[in-house]
Amino acid sequence: MSNTLTYFSRTSDLDDDIRNPAALWLMREKTWGFSDQLTYKNGNHTIVGGYDYYKDAMNKYQDQYTPDMTAKVDNQAFFIQDNMKFGHWTVTPGIRFSRHSEYGHKTSASGVIAYDCSEATNVYISYKEFFRAPYIYEMFNPFYGSEKLNPEEGETKEIGINTRIDDKTTFSAHYFQTDSDNLIGFNSATWKYYNAGAERIKGWDVQLNKFFDDHFSAAIAYTHTYIPSTNPSSNDNRNGYIPKGQYDLTFNYDADKFNGSLNFKGIVDRPGNKAYEDEVLDTYKTVWTANAAVNYNPVKGMNIFLRVNNIFDRMYTDMTYDMRNPGGVGWYSQPGRNFIAGAEYTF
């Protein structure tokens, strides 16, 4: 039997456009909470249960449309699951009881069934329900929000395979489908958060890992996502907000006192808002970036490191609702090529 008790606290302070009082945007937000998880093993059973609590507080929110706003919500939940092994089979049912201060009680179920085809390969199917209450600003902001919003609810189904091809190579593949009700979106015409209705997300991913020797390894992965458009005036994947494809290629080197990694990431087919798609350069719709990191441990407990981010100095943005050339409404570029060097000592 083992127990883990965790406390967390996150504070977010935003001061935007402070030199322009007419467009001033201030936010003082804090989230804190704790989680206690108990794990009990007995024979073929591993039972995990516990309690979560968190509290969100918007201590101050102010913009040109909202003179002042404060609000608080909290959520608590009990959860339990049992991982049961029967020969080649593993069955894991679970249940979660939640109570939200604004939306009351909710019960969510989950289950996983896995089968070991051999010592090298296993397959599984899973089913998980979820519940998301609106965030504070979606509910209580007097200009953008609405206290009549319904919480998002839904379920995710997944099937997958994990296999070891040989002593140095592993492969995995997964397919998932998520169905949501009462999806919360933002209406750019009314400037209000609203329940946009039902949504279905389909996707799959594959990953290959290879160890070439005791020091050098590589991993390549691809994730594909498809969300059908709800109307002819919008692109698929939430009007182009979410890329249809993402590639990850990572090379790793690990020695006694030295290790390093080189990562390439590709965001593919993310056109952004259909109304502006013709004004978006192809280099913003598909973006490749690279990052590198090296660590050197001269003595026990000491690490000297160097990070190089965005090696190719690519100009790109994550503000996908408007990806027109820099200077367009809502354009926030990601950092260009940058370096971080330092040393850490642990004792």
Image: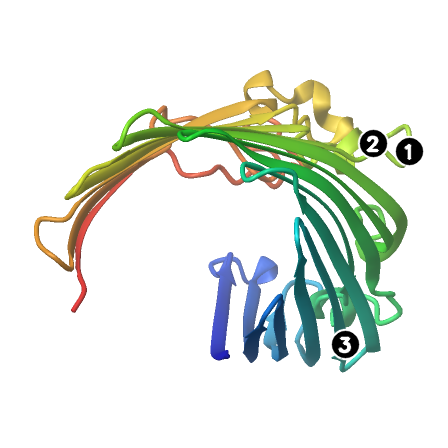
Give the x, y percent position of residue 246. Answer: 58, 29
The residue wearing badge 2 is 234
* Viewport quadrant of the C terminus: bottom left
- In primary-sequence order, the first of circles 1 and 3 is 3
What residue do we see at 72% from left, 26% from top? 276
Contact between marks 1 and 3 (CB within 8 A): the answer is no
Q: Residues within 10 Å of mark 1 (few under 14, many from 20)?
A: few
* Numbered tag placed on residue 97 in the rendering: 3
Q: Is residue 185 visible?
A: no
- In primary-sequence order, the first of circles 3 and 2 is 3
Residue type (three-letter) at the residue carrying disc 2: Ser
Q: Secondary structure beneath disc 3? A: strand
Name the side, left or right, on which 32 lies relative to 161: left
Q: Secondary structure beneath disc 1? A: loop
The residue wearing badge 1 is 231
Contact between marks 3 and 2 (CB within 8 A): the answer is no
Residue type (three-letter) at the residue carrying disc 3: Phe
Contact between marks 2 and 1 (CB within 8 A): the answer is yes
Residue type (three-letter) at the residue carrying disc 1: Asn
Does residue 230 sit above or below 325 in this rendering?
Answer: below
What residue do we see at 42% from left, 26% from top? 314
Does residue 55 sit above or below 157 in this rendering?
Answer: below
Give the x, y percent position of residue 159. Answer: 73, 41
What residue do we see at 87% from left, 65% from top? 150
Give the x, y percent position of residue 203. Answer: 73, 35
Q: Is residue 166 visible?
A: yes
Name the side, left or right, on which 306 lies relative to 203: left
* Residue 75, picture quadrant: bottom right
What residue do we see at 48% from left, 24% from top? 288
